[in-house]
């Protein structure tokens, strides 16, 4: 009589086989509200659920009123939680998109928004808050990177206490991200690894994901814009294999994909289907 899954685990006889089959069992596929064209809108939750995603990444907003982020509102937060519960879907993370306006690398307001975003992210049970560094806010010099590391060292204890991870999304190397993380001296500051951004910046995501390892990555963005996934230059089978090699990564990979045909439902469904099939193939 074949052994059950539990018996295999307890006996240790099937540990190798189970590990191979479960390499991607902890990976969840979400989607960004902005790529659903529902930036900062509650409707993104129902749409993400209808399309088959496991979660939706929520924008915290850029239109500041009375020195507060748009989602720094208890009533709105309760609406998000209620809608997520109704739809049976996770809030896969938050994006502190105001850092596209107040750059964390040189604007004191950036530090305030990070501090303000932590309790919002905790309230939404989203676990990860993305900190973007792009455009004029992109990290370019060692001095800028050191400054960000020092700023986050001051804020990180609050994130640790809240159980929130601060995710660095940028266009610098894995090694430079690791140096920033080390400078913060905090387990709450990790890399938010964007496959497309890294590729466009000249880095190899397959190698960098393996180099960073499971404990230095909090979340992923999957994209190969302006193409459909699997039809551009990025080696997605290799990317998925590198994620699988992390040894039980638990968390979200969020699609930040464009819509080549301008049909959100069809294009997002197509990209999601590609990733689901690739995950199944990689897990075999």
Image (spheres, grey):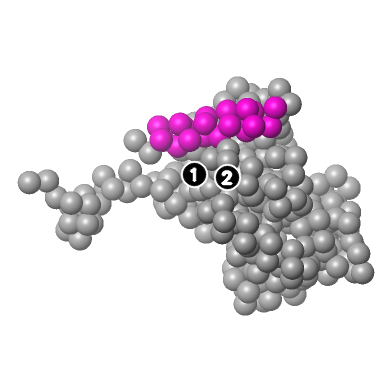
According to the picture, the residue beneath numbered tag 2 turns out to be: 49
Residues 35 and 168: in front is 35
Q: Give coordinates of residue 141: x percent, y percent.
A: 82, 52
Q: Where does the magenta region start and end?
A: 263-282
Label for residue 243? Answer: 1
Residue at x 70%, y 71% (from the top left corner)? 119
User: Where 60 falls versus 47 (above or below)?
Assistant: below
Q: Are marks 2 and 1 in contact (CB under 8 Å)?
A: no
Distance of label 2 from label 1 (alpha carbons): 24 Å
Q: Give coordinates of residue 95: x percent, y percent.
A: 72, 55
Identify the secondary structure beneath mark 2. helix
Residues 269 and 163: in front is 269
Residue at x 89%, y 61% (from the top left corner)? 64
Quarter-wise, where is residue 228 in the image? top right
Instruction: Locate the C terminus by quadrant.
Output: top left
Q: Earlier in the sequence, mark 2 or mark 1?
A: 2
Label for residue 54? Answer: none
Magenta run includes residue 270:
yes
Residue at x 85%, y 44% (from the top left corner)? 135
Residues 10 and 64: in front is 64
User: Where 198 falls versus 274 (above or below)?
Assistant: below
Magenta run includes residue 120:
no
> Is any atom of residue 248 visible in this view?
yes
224 left or right, relative to 108 = left
Q: Give coordinates of residue 275: x percent, y percent.
A: 52, 34
């Amino acid at each position: 009589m074949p052994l059950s899954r539990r018996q295999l685990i307890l006996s240790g006889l099937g540990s190798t086989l189970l590990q191979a089959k479960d390499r991607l069992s902890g990976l969840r596929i979400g989607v960004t509200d902005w790529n659903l064209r529902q930036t900062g809108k509650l409707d993104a939750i129902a749409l993400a659920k209808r399309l088959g995603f496991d979660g939706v990444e929520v924008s915290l907003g850029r239109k500041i009123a009375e020195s507060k982020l748009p989602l720094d509102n208890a009533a709105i937060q309760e609406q998000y939680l209620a809608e997520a519960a109704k739809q049976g879907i996770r809030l896969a993370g938050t994006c502190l998109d105001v850092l596209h306006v107040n750059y964390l690398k040189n604007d004191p307001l950036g530090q305030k928004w990070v501090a303000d975003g932590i309790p919002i992210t905790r309230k939404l049970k989203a676990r990860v808050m993305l900190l973007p560094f792009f455009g004029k806010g992109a990290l370019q010099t060692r001095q800028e990177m050191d400054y960000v590391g020092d700023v986050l060292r001051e804020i990180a204890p609050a994130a640790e206490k809240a159980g929130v991870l601060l995710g660095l999304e940028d266009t610098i190397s894995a090694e430079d991200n690791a140096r920033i993380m080390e400078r913060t001296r905090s387990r709450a500051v990790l890399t938010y690894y964007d496959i497309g951004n890294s590729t466009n910046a000249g880095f190899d995501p397959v190698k960098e994901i393996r180099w960073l390892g499971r404990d230095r990555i909090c979340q992923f963005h999957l994209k190969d814009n302006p193409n459909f996934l699997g039809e551009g230059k990025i080696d997605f089978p290799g990317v998925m294999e590198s994620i699988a090699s992390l040894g039980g990564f638990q968390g979200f990979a969020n699609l930040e994909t464009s819509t080549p045909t301008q049909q959100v439902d069809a294009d997002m469904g197509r990209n999601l289907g590609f990733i689901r099939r690739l995950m199944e193939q990689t897990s075999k």
